[in-house]
Image (cartoon, coloured by chain):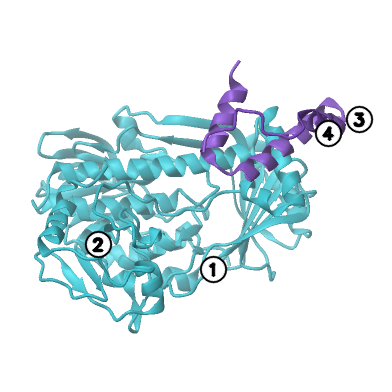
Amino acid sequence: MPYDYQPYPYTPPPGLSAPEPRHRVVIVGAGPIGLAMALELANHGIASVIVDDNNVVSVGSRAICWSKRSLEILDRLGVGERAVARGVTWQVGRTFHRDTEVFNFDLLPEDGHQMPAFVNLQQYYVEEFLVEAAQANDLIDLRFKNKVTGFDPMGDCVVVDIETPDGGYALEAEYLLACDGARSPVRQMMGLDFEGELFEERFLIADIEMEGDFPSERHFWFEPTFHPGQSALLHKQPDNIYRIDLQLGWDADPEHEKQPDVVIPRIEKVVGHSDFRLDWVSVYTFQCRRLERFVHDRVIFVGDSAHVVSPFGARGGNGGLQDVDNLGWKLAAVLRGEAGEPLLATYDAERVQGADENIRNSTRSTRFMTPADGVERLFRDQVLALAAKTPFARSWVNSGRLSQPCVYRTAAPDSAALPAGTRPGSVATDAPLGNGWLMPRLAGQVTLLALNTAAPDLTGAQTLTPELSDPLRRRYLGDAAQALYLIRPDQVVAARWTTAETDTIQAEIDAIWTGARCR
Amino acid sequence: MPLTQTPNLADHDAFYEDLLAAHQGRSAEESAALNAQLVLILANHVGDPEVLREALALAARR
């Protein structure tokens, strides 16, 4: 079944008839990032207004691969379980050269996590779920057909000019969050440019609907016989929808390539028959670029408006949700007067680091997939040839390194006796806890996780002293007998010790709110 | 462990001969492919990123 696009109703905003009181936050863009941003702020008690020039969810599947980390974030926003239930769960990827499998990977080889490694779910479903959650939330005022036409930073607020079908009005907000996508009008209005690389390559992207029992796996081909000399990617989505990406070459004419009588024969060669229906087609080029800074006083860029990557690696939507994750609790603290600008500066530092990591990985994948003529192509082809002969060379085969949360640089206390996977700066690793899971217990506030030791009385942190289980021991203790983990509201490990004085822990709690450990 | 820059083969002439023999009868393009695979195989064997960086720098020096 193709997706049934239902326009959301437009309601004339109050600002048309009388000036509205100053808002705390205005979010531009009701895509997955803007909606998630509003819900995350609401989790921290902050009200926001979302304005969007459109009134339907994403046309075409667009972002489809949601990582374990994104699902954990969506879970905090109330739609994680729904996304998993509706989506196609997968964790195995297979890479082919010509028609032979050269390499496969399993993204989550161990049990004991609430969320799977990846779920494929069309962006329009994610947006639909988030819109429903936003509309049900008293702290969120979601306004469709409200287009931002300009704004003025005024010192202690931003005045935003908005156009509606019934005319224009203005909103005042303490912060303006640009969640308005890769072509961000807010970014353009500020005259800000991306820095980075544009790849001269065109890919065809198509959703097709077909009956079939194709496994829930990611398949990537280098130079398949059905698409000679180029690369191809196949992903399964719910509703019998399959995503196909085909490399076309830079010389391809995008308008011509989008025509059904051109696309359909290409797809027939991929799937081996013509028993499918074309649902959505687009032709795109890649960019791997970002803004120099994401925080511009009272205007903050979040998601694709701040950084763009090639699609191989699922680092666009997932990277954007990690921005939301990082910004929500910090901005809420600033708005409550509990933290200052230095904490917001750590959003800039940490998410620039995240964006750079995504851009670096995405750029590397793109160069491997679409090598320039000459030595780039020589090495790419020889890696593939060698990978067919010997297993060690498969590590070089790069069809996309899939999104992982970045480990933020920090100067916080650490103990070398504890496992590397949960070191300060990393997202806490999930584990079973009682009848539930660890991650939801860590969300939204500062937590001291005390393992095999008593938790001291602290100000400004909840304490969690779970009974030790094998996964907890393996992920948080390693060979150590006991540990104390201080965890931020975004479930990132702030500091850890095998033993610590109460004052030491208390100082690190304070450092979470000042951002003093960020490097 | 820095890059070994002192003679480290028991018989340099023998390896040189083997290297040329491996390229014998190949076109320039096939030789380039062989060399590329050889670099990858040896890089994996060496393993140490510092040694590899030094090797790259030495080879790139004009």
Tint of chain A: cyan
Instruction: Tell me which corner region of the image, top left, top right, bottom left or bottom right, holds residue A437.
Output: bottom left
The residue that disc 2 covers is: A497
Residue B25 bears which disc, if any? 3
Q: Residues within 10 Å of mark 3 (few under 14, many from 20)?
A: few
In this view, the residue farthest toward the right is: B25
- Label 1 vs label 4, nearer the camera: 4
Foreground: A111 or A279?
A111
> Depth-wise, is mark 4 or mark 3 nearer the camera?
4
Estimate the x, y position of residue B50 in percent, counting from the top left. Answer: 51, 36
Q: Looking at the image, is mark 1 or mark 3 nearer the viewer?
A: 3
Query: Could you tell whether A234 is left or right of A336 in the image?
Result: right
**Residue at the spot of label 1:** A109
Mark 1 in CB contact with mark 3 (< 8 angstroms): no
In front: mark 3 or mark 2?
Answer: 2
For chain B, the rendered hue is: purple
Q: Nearer the viewer, residue A238 or B44?
A: B44
The first of marks 4 and 3 along the sequence is 4
Residue type pointed to by label 4: Asp
- Secondary structure beneath dot 4 equals helix
The relative height of residue A190 versus residue A265 in the rendered view (above or below) is above
